[in-house]
Image: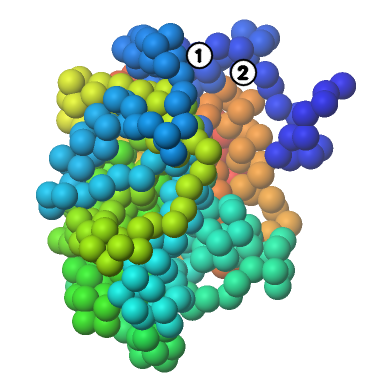
Amino acid sequence: MTAVFYRGVTAHYPTAAHSDGMYIFDDTGKKYLDMSGGAAVSCVGHQHPRVVASLCQQIKTMAFAHTAFFSNPPQEQLAEALAAKFGEPGAKIYFTSGGSEANETAFKMAWQYWRALGRPSKQKIISRIHSYHGNTYGALSISGNLTRRRVMGELLLDWPRIDPCYAYRYLRAGETLADYALRAANSLETMILQQGAETIAAFIAEPVVGASLGVVAAESGYFKRVREICDQYDILLIADEIMCGSGRTGTFFAHEQEDFLPDIVTLAKGIAGGYQPLAATLARAHIHETFVTTGRGFDHGHTYVGHASACAAGLAVVTVIDDEKLLHNVRKQGDYLQKSLEAAFGDHPHIGDIRGRGLFRGLEIVADKVTKTPFADEKNITKRLKQATMTHGLICYPGGGSLRDNLGSHILLAPPFIVEPGHIDQLIDKLRAIFSDILDN
Ligand SMILES: Cc1ncc(COP(=O)(O)O)c(C=O)c1O
């Protein structure tokens, strides 16, 4: 019997009892290899001694002081550290508790920015199909994750969405990747012209799409063209790096690997590595200055904005990433992970694509590799994969809907940045057994 209202109301979950490095142990002593950091959260591994010590020290010194009354040292230091990593001086960071809140903050920044500039008709936010920006009302309205939206029916706002840049499914026969990248980006311009630029506040996209598509990076040139279009039509560009940021792809910000600077970047998950709930909305200097110079201010706030203990965890995680040179390991082990997946499953009849950047990798699962047809919905592949991974003592992140609606399955891998080749070899063995249970039968 339990008094917990679980996320899956009829689901049974093992109880996580303790964790260490790459592993979580349940209360029966079963060991789970964590190859997705939950949902791309535990970036420095579990129970990292330096993070635990910094967090304990902050809690002993001052756990919380409401930021409507005070600032606090971890908030100041973390903001400075993140601003220094951004590609332009003067960025300012607004701290909240989770990814959805970070995106809601970004949307409000965009709306209030245009109001401050006397252009209140700029309201709509364009997003992409197969994108996920959160589960609060505004963030889900703007998301393109159809499975998660469907349950809310007509209650959600229905704003414009364009197709993602997803060459595996949208590249036309005979088209080069460079041409496709331009075609995909130009669909943003078409949408802006259809809607009227004076009605559009912002465009939001994940530089590397996470849970909705199974780790899809845009083709080279896509974001550069998107940036040009946004500049041409006075549209703010929001990079949702909640999953792909904080070092996951091998650079601190995922957009660093594309040739553009967003106006606003949102971070969460890896930013505090799961040690505390923390998220960040980074605004470029010109956005912050607009709120200052127009005298309009930025009207927003939650109780836990800039929470001292959460920021202390974030500061410790970012310091560990830098001091232990973990991004080097992200790139090195990321290459090893990709090569190992290709060697083991490149010829598998149901693994259609193996892709990603750094320690952010995805496998797309198909019924037929030539036609790229997904398994029928009734086969419940995504759900069965999740169950099988847990049975085999593996945590990874299976997801659905990469073709449309419920159709299409993928597995997302996002191991902690401390991963070693031995863990990757274990992953491959476990995946072999899981695929043989679920896909080969
Ligand atoms: C890209 C992206 N944006 C936003 C969110 C929402 O974050 P949260 O679940 O912390 O509210 C997520 C969560 O998975 C995400 O992957």
Which residue is at the front of the view, 307 or 277? 307
Q: Nearer the viewer, residue 166 or 244?
A: 244
Of 95 and 218, the residue lying toward us: 95
**C-beta proximity under 8 Å, tags 2 and 1:** yes
Local SS, label 1: strand
Give the residue type that dot 2 points to: Ala
Rendered residue at 30%/57% (across/down): 264
202 w.r.t. 210: above or below: below
> Quadrant location of residue 305?
top left
Can I make out residue 1 in this image? yes
Check residue 19 in the rendering and tell me which mark sits there, or answer none. 1
Is residue 133 toward the left or the right of residue 106 in the image?
A: right
Is 357 displayed left or right of 56 in the figure?
A: left
Circle 2 sits on which residue?
Answer: 16
Q: Residue at x 34, y 32 (%)?
A: 71
> Where is residue 237, by image quadrant?
bottom left
Residue 195, horizontal then vertical, whole percent: 43, 88
